[in-house]
Amino acid sequence: MTLRSFDRELPPELPKALAALADLSPAARAHFADLLAETIGPMPDDQLDNRIVRLCRKLELDPAKLAPPLKSARYLFRLAATQGSSPADLAVDLDALLPGRGLAPLLVPLYERALPLLRQELATASLAAHGKVLAGIEWRVDAIASSDRGRGINLPVVLMTLAYREREQSGSVTMQLLPSMVKELRDVCDRLLSPNEPPPRS
């Protein structure tokens, strides 16, 4: 079945797996949203399976019953996000995919919650395909006491490690910043976050 939100034929087993959501125990349904949030990100199939088993065991739930609807909802959400499908589009498709099952009221709010994260993932992947993308920052403050260049320097220095992604690779670079450069970096960030504010008077 091809639906308007998707550009490919959906797996034939997907409707049955999604429909199993209605048969979950109250405890399993209560944790479904959190489990989906924990597994919505990109990962290999074996890692996904292991994570589902680990999370279900922690909650004393049956992974065999939860895995099919969980993986199907994840597949559907990630595919819909790549197509730019709105929550309203997904609601229409769910009603067409599973008529009379009433799953749209349950799944559409979860898709709406996951959509910003999925779109951010797509944007990051798109950027990473053409160059390095900042993925994280770690820092610490040290001090230069003395060196072979001079004694009694006694100046704080920030070590900042920038993690980045580039295509399927990841890496990092560590920079040393003196206080004057930290202040300049802060000023740049302030201007970027408040682009409509006039520059400070000198």
Image (cartoon, rainbow, N blue to C red):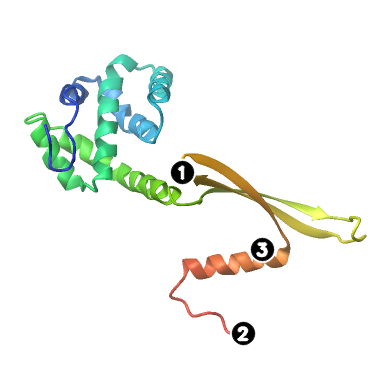
User: Which sits in the foreground, 109 or 135?
Assistant: 135
Rendered image quadrant of residue 105: top left
Q: Callout 1: helix, strand or loop?
A: loop
What is the secondary structure assignment of the residue under circle 2? loop
Choose the circle earlier in sequence order: 3 or 1. 1
Please identify the quadrant where the N terminus is shown: top left
Q: Which tag, 3 or 2, sits closer to the chain's start? A: 3
Residue 18 appears in the picture as rendered:
yes
Q: Decide if residue 116 is on the left or right side of residue 50.
A: left
Q: Earlier in the sequence, mark 2 or mark 1?
A: 1
Q: Residue at x 40, y 27 (%)?
A: 44
- Figure quadrant of residue 143: bottom right
- As drawn, the label of residue 133 is none
Q: In the rendered structure, which amino acid carries the disc numbered 2?
A: Ser
The outermost residue toward the front is 130
x%, y% of residue 61?
35, 17
Amino acid carrying label 3: it is Val
Give the total number of marks visible in the rendering: 3
Task: Judge by depth and name the residue closer to the eye, 153 or 127.
Answer: 127
Q: Which residue in the structure is indicated by mark 3?
A: 182
Q: Is residue 51 above or below residue 8?
A: above
Q: Which mark is residue 202?
A: 2
Residue 77 is situated, as x and y percent measured from the top left of the image, at 26, 37
- Residue matched to label 1: 167
Q: Is residue 62 visible?
A: no
